[in-house]
Image (cartoon, rainbow, N blue to C red):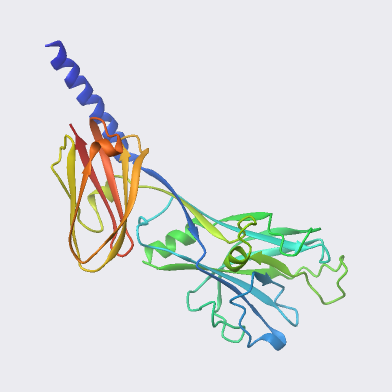
């Protein structure tokens, strides 16, 4: 009788925990790397492309040779319908020969551009203003010193792109006209803000990362579990030791399978490539150190979205 009571008590606690898990399930944090970055330059360089440069420059568009930096990031795949936060981070500096400070303005940008072909003459229209930052000049020890980073909250814009089922999110970075001639530059000149690109990272593998990123935070809750983007079968469920994941794929795909406990902590994960047809993956609870309880399996597909399913281990 006592054992039966303890069993019921444990079951009740597990259900309470699971209900709480459904409301605040699987807090996630991901870093999205920049996929394309470049800048365009006016004046006599208006027809030139700078897609392979190790820096993306920004300079006041009121000058004779303005510069605008562009950054693009992939969106979609395994991401949820919305995120709780999205933070754009980029590495930049203003050379000490420039005015003391420059104002960088971050704008929304349409995705009708490619780093390998865009020029000042073919540049997309700059979108709505998001935020601005003051960049201080620095006495750099060597060219391309991107040790200082800046961050901007882009949550609203990120969720706007997700809601529109966008596949990419782009930003334009412009230098605001300050008419600050306190540096060594002459009248009519403006500072040239340098932003690190992914090409700089490739060319300098031993140096700190200078490429732009977006860090997102989101929570997969009960709505994500009930509205899976593609169905996944788990059997047997409940499972005591061996269980199988099953799904049919129309094309080849890349999967990442993550296992979470009821407190939202990731227990383990693995990646796998699948071929068209029926996919069956046999797993053992011991390989994930899964004790008796309730778990959530998140399967992120590169082409088919996300599936979040409940698994009970006896």
Residue 40 point in image, percent of width and height: 63, 79
Q: 283 or 145: which is nearer to us?
A: 283
Taking 267 as reference, is 208 left or right? Answer: right
Residue 285, located in which quarter of the rendered image?
top left
Quarter of the image with the N terminus in it: top left
Q: Residue furthest left?
A: 1
Q: 176 or 266: which is nearer to us?
A: 266
Residue 220 point in image, percent of width and height: 34, 47
Residue 184, located in which quarter of the rendered image?
bottom right
Residue 267 point in image, percent of width and height: 34, 39
Taking 274 as reference, is 177 left or right? Answer: right
Taking 222 as reference, is 218 left or right? Answer: right
Q: Is residue 199 above or below residue 138?
A: below
Residue at the spot 56% in from the left edge and 82% down from the top edge: 118
Taking 154 as reference, is 296 left or right? Answer: left
Residue at the spot 73% in from the left edge and 78% down from the top edge: 62
Quarter of the image with the C terminus in it: top left
Residue 145, located in which quarter of the rendered image?
bottom right
Q: How many marks?
A: 0
Residue at the spot 66% in from the left edge and 65% down from the top edge: 195
Residue 80 point in image, percent of width and height: 35, 55
Q: 176 or 8: which is nearer to us?
A: 8
Q: Is residue 194 above or below residue 40?
A: above
């Amino acid at each position: 009788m006592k054992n039966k009571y303890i069993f019921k008590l444990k079951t009740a606690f597990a259900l309470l925990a699971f209900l709480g898990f459904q409301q605040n399930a699987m807090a996630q944090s991901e870093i999205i790397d920049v996929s394309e970055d470049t800048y365009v330059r006016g004046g006599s360089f208006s027809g030139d492309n700078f897609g392979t440069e190790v820096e993306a420059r920004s300079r006041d568009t009121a000058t004779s040779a303005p510069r605008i930096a562009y950054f693009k990031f992939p969106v979609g795949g395994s991401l949820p319908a919305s995120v709780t936060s999205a933070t754009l981070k980029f590495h930049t500096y203003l050379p000490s020969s420039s005015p003391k400070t420059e104002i960088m303005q971050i704008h929304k940008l349409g995705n009708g551009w490619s780093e390998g072909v865009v020029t000042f003459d073919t540049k997309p229209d700059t979108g709505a203003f998001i935020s601005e930052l003051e960049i201080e000049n620095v006495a750099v020890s060597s060219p391309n010193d991107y040790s200082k980073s800046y961050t901007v909250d882009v949550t609203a814009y990120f969720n706007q792109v997700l809601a529109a089922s966008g596949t990419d999110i782009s930003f334009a970075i412009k230098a605001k006209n300050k008419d600050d001639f306190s540096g060594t530059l002459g009248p009519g000149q403006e500072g040239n803000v340098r932003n690190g690109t992914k090409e700089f990272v490739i060319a300098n593998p031993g140096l700190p990362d200078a490429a732009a990123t977006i860090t997102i935070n989101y929570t997969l809750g009960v709505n994500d579990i009930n509205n899976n983007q593609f169905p996944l079968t788990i059997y047997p469920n409940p499972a005591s030791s061996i269980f199988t994941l099953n799904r049919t794929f129309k094309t080849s795909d890349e999967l990442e399978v993550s296992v979470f406990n009821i407190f939202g902590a990731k227990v383990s994960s693995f990646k796998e490539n699948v071929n068209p047809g029926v996919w069956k993956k046999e797993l053992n609870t011991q390989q994930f150190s899964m004790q008796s309880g309730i778990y959530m399996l998140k399967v992120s597909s590169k082409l088919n979205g996300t599936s979040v399913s409940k698994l009970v281990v006896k």
